[in-house]
């Protein structure tokens, strides 16, 4: 069984297969929802960016400032090299459970598959709680946490309702749960 919750798994995966890969959905399948909730001039944090084309496609669609983080140094180095000509796309190695950004730094945080990967690791419940607390901390007032997950919406919302709203006064609004095929 794949160890999605371990940094070593991701370093090995990206070393063996550096080609771009999009978990669950490409931008074309998410663009309508992203455009509804995230503005083109928002400062965006892409948590667990991996080597997905999501940030590149958002940039090509007019999003102006996207900070990408991933736990894997291997993929971060690959992406820095791949997008060196796109200054609006920055990449840093960072753990979403321990963000190194100041409070209220971002208008939106996108996590595509990130929560699911964390839930596959040791201490999964505590680590998802840390992720939610950190995201809540770095989100500006009225910010958007856009999660793409394979999990049942009620299950994922439980984490948000327990952690996000209590930690920094954010309100959890579940306006849409979509099944995209």
Image: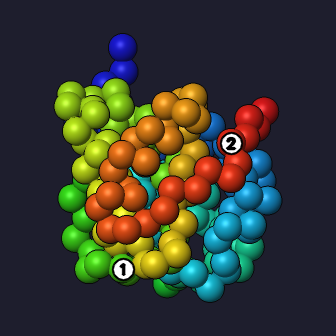
Q: Nearest the camera: 166 or 18?
A: 166
Q: Which residue is mark 2?
A: 177
Residue under the point 49% across and 52% down: 111
Real-space Cα distance between discs 1 and 2?
26 Å
Q: Residues within 10 Å of mark 1 (few under 14, many from 20)?
A: some
Q: Is residue 123 left or right of residue 131?
A: left
Kindly state the secondary structure of the residue where label 2 is placed. loop
Observer-nearest of 50 and 15: 50
Which quadrant, please, contains the N terminus?
top left
Q: Position of residue 154 (x, y in %)?
A: 55, 33
| Colour convention | rainbow
Q: In the rendered image of this protein, does residue 77 appear above or below residue 48?
A: below
Give whichever of 162, 148 is nearer the camera. Answer: 162
Find residue 59 and name its label: none
Residue 180: x %, y % from top left: 76, 37
The numbered dot on residue 104 is 1
x 28%, y 34%: residue: 125
Q: Residue at x 39, y 58 (%)?
A: 165
- Asked if one can make out residue 93 in the rendered structure from this viewpoint, the answer is no
The spot of residue 71 in percent (x, y) is 29, 51
Camera sees residue 156: yes
Spot the residue most to the top.
1
* Residue 10: % across, % down: 33, 39
Q: Earlier in the sequence, mark 1 or mark 2?
A: 1
């Amino acid at each position: 069984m794949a160890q999605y919750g371990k940094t070593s798994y991701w370093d090995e995966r990206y070393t063996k297969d550096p080609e771009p890969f999009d978990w669950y959905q490409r931008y074309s399948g998410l663009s309508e929802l992203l455009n509804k909730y995230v503005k083109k001039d928002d400062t965006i944090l892409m948590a667990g960016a991996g080597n997905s084309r999501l940030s590149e496609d958002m940039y090509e669609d007019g999003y102006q400032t996207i900070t990408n983080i991933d736990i894997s140094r291997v993929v971060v180095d690959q992406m820095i090299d791949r997008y060196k000509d796109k200054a609006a796309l920055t990449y840093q190695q960072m753990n979403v459970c321990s963000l190194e950004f100041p409070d209220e730094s971002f208008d939106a945080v996108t996590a595509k598959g990130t929560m699911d990967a964390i839930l596959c690791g040791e201490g999964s419940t505590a680590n998802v709680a840390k992720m939610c607390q950190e995201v809540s901390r770095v989100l500006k007032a009225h910010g958007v946490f856009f999660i793409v997950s394979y999990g049942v919406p009620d299950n994922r919302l439980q984490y948000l309702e327990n952690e996000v709203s209590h930690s920094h006064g954010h309100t959890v609004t579940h306006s849409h749960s979509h099944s995209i095929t």
